[in-house]
Image (cartoon, rainbow, N blue to C red):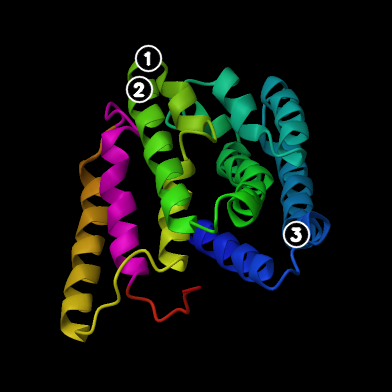
């Protein structure tokens, strides 16, 4: 959600000022992510040499290659039955699946905003909302027929990024009452904690279940005093 907000804010502002270029956008992403990513991979290789079994260390090598190209979500989708598999502790880079999803979002979303700017009359809220609904419907479908793909694929996670984008675009009304805002934030926190403590390994996820933490995060995020595009 935070990435959805930030990328929407940065990209739409630059598009409105006619300053956006794909080259600059991706150079900024590389400078921000690559140093930390390579530090993580090198450190993992060092510690893995001493603590992982040979087969697991070999798997670490393959997963690191996919991670560098931000495809680790695809790798782990094919390798494991989900992020909560019994032997997931033997995969020290499994958390990078979300980074793969985020980078794939970075690959397509700016182009989507450019299309809206140039050919769809800058109706950002409308088209981002359509993308949100379409992604959520795909998520609901896949959680039943292919839950692993639903968990790991970028397309079934767009709706979560889109919530942040809609906040940036001013799609949600501002609250004049601080008390009401605090109440909503507490409700959001309760939603998140409910998901943390009540969801089980058998809970179909993302699916409908993902709405609870997503809306909870949205209710909290909306109360942060941030500038919106409109």
- Of 136 and 169, nearer the camera is 169
- Residue at 33% x, 60% y is 218
Considering the numbered disc 2 on the image, is that residue within a helix, a strand or a loop?
Answer: helix
Counting from the top left corner in percent of width and height, residue 156 is at 46, 34
- Residue at 20% x, 59% y is 190
Relative to 179, 140 lies left or right: right
- Of 112 and 123, nearer the camera is 123
- Which comes before the other along the chain, label 3 or label 2? 3
Task: Judge the density around disc 2: few (<14), some (14-19), many (≥20) Cα neighbours within 10 Å.
Answer: some
Q: Quadrant of residue 61?
A: top right
Residue range (magenta): 201-222
Q: Tell whether position 206 is magenta.
A: yes
- Which comes before the other along the chain, label 3 or label 1? 3
Residue 106 visible (yes or no): yes
Q: Tell whether position 111 is magenta.
A: no
Distance of label 2 from label 1 (alpha carbons): 7 Å
Considering the numbered disc 3 on the image, is that residue within a helix, a strand or a loop?
Answer: helix
For mark 1, what is the residue?
Answer: 145
Relative to 13, 179 lies left or right: left
Residue 1 visible (yes or no): no
For mark 2, what is the residue?
Answer: 141
Q: Which label belongs to residue 25?
A: 3
- Magenta part, dominant SS: helix
């Amino acid at each position: 959600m935070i990435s959805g907000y930030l990328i929407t804010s940065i990209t739409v502002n630059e598009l409105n000022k006619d300053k956006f270029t794909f080259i600059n956008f991706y150079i900024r992403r590389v400078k921000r992510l690559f140093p930390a990513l390579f530090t993580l991979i090198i450190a993992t290789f060092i510690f893995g040499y001493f603590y992982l079994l040979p087969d697991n260390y070999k798997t670490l090598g393959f997963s690191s290659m996919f991670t560098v190209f931000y495809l680790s979500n695809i790798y782990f989708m094919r390798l494991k039955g989900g992020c909560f598999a019994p032997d997931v502790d033997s995969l020290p880079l499994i958390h990078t699946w979300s980074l793969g999803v985020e980078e794939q979002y970075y690959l397509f979303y700016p182009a989507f905003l450019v299309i809206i700017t140039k050919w769809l009359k800058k109706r950002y809220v409308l088209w981002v909302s359509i993308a949100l609904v379409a992604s959520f419907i795909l998520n609901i479908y896949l959680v039943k027929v292919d839950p692993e793909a639903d968990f790991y694929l970028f397309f079934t996670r767009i709706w979560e990024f889109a919530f942040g984008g809609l906040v940036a675009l001013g799609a949600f009304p501002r609250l004049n009452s601080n008390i009401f805002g605090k109440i909503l934030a507490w409700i959001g926190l309760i939603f998140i904690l409910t998901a943390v403590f009540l969801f089980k390994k058998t809970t179909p996820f993302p699916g409908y279940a993902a709405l609870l933490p997503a809306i909870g995060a949205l209710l909290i995020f909306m109360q942060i005093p941030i500038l919106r595009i409109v």
